[in-house]
Image: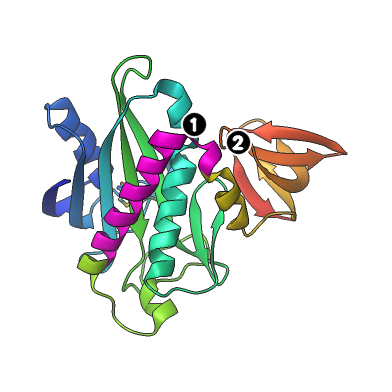
Amino acid sequence: WSLFLYPEVDSTNAEALRLLSAGALPPFVVLAEAQKAGRGRRGRKWISPVAQNLYYSLAYRITGGFQQLSGLSLVAGLAVMISLRNLGVRQIGLKWPNDIYAGGKKLAGVLLELSGDPADVCYVVIGVGINVNMVSTKEQIDQPWTSLRTELGHLVDRNSVATCLSDTLHSYLQRHTDYGFASIQEEWEREHIWQGRDCVLSTASQQVYGRVVGIDEMGGLRLEVGGVEKSFNSGELSLR
Ligand code: BTN
């Protein structure tokens, strides 16, 4: 994968999308030392201080149309988690759809953004933010968080994190392309820290109380709600 490296950008996802519009050919990776306007899921900010963490975006071509897209964000989250476990982090797991937690605190997040027409040639930008050496910040972060440094007890080289991440992403994306999401579904469920737990899912229109059953073959969340199993494609999960 070719690499674009910047001292500072607004957002590596935004930069990857601009590069795609300008004709850059995927796969390529955008890395920055700092982000001025790091984006999180659901319109949130991603705090991105200089030289402390990993701000990584992979531009990737999708050939399987919509079908391939549905599970991709979960596959990306799983690959990020596996790469961090390989670096030695323990008690690590996933929260649907693609948050990475260690010891109950958020360690990394994934944000997918699309470019092009999903019915035709379609590119996706897989944005990954990993808290690497950050141990404090003056910024307000709206949930408990941790970093690799906290979890491993020493400073961590961001280059090795990026390399490990690229290797793992590469192999999981390949598996997804070759064998589909079904080949990853079970492994994903095993890593879901909320499997079987009572929770509330906040969607744009409602709050759903249920028990996490698993995920479906498209990557949707399966909840048991009042004795009936239902699938959900979006929402924010919290414990009850
Ligand atoms: C989340 O809300 O959990 C997703 C956070 C994703 C942050 C990463 S940092 C690199 C890439 N560029 C962005 O602007 N966001 C993603």
State if disc 1 and disc 2 touch (CB < 8 Å).
yes
Kind of residue indicated by mark 2: Gly
Q: Is residue 19 left or right of residue 179?
A: left
In reply to whether residue 210 is colored magenta, the answer given is: no
User: As rendered, which of 175 and 198 lies closer to the eye?
Assistant: 175
Q: Which residues are magenta?
A: 161-183
Kindly identify the residue that appears in the image at 11 percent across and 27 percent down: 22
Residue 239's mark?
A: none
Give the x, y percent position of residue 74: 49, 44
Rendered residue at 33%/84% (across/down)? 154
Residue at horizontal 24%, vertical 68%? 160
Residue 182 x/y as whole percent: 55, 37
How many neighbours does mark 2 have within 10 angstroms: few (below 14), some (14-19), or many (20 or more)? some
Magenta stretch, overall SS:
helix
Residue 220 tag number: 2
Q: Residue at left 57%, top 48%?
A: 96
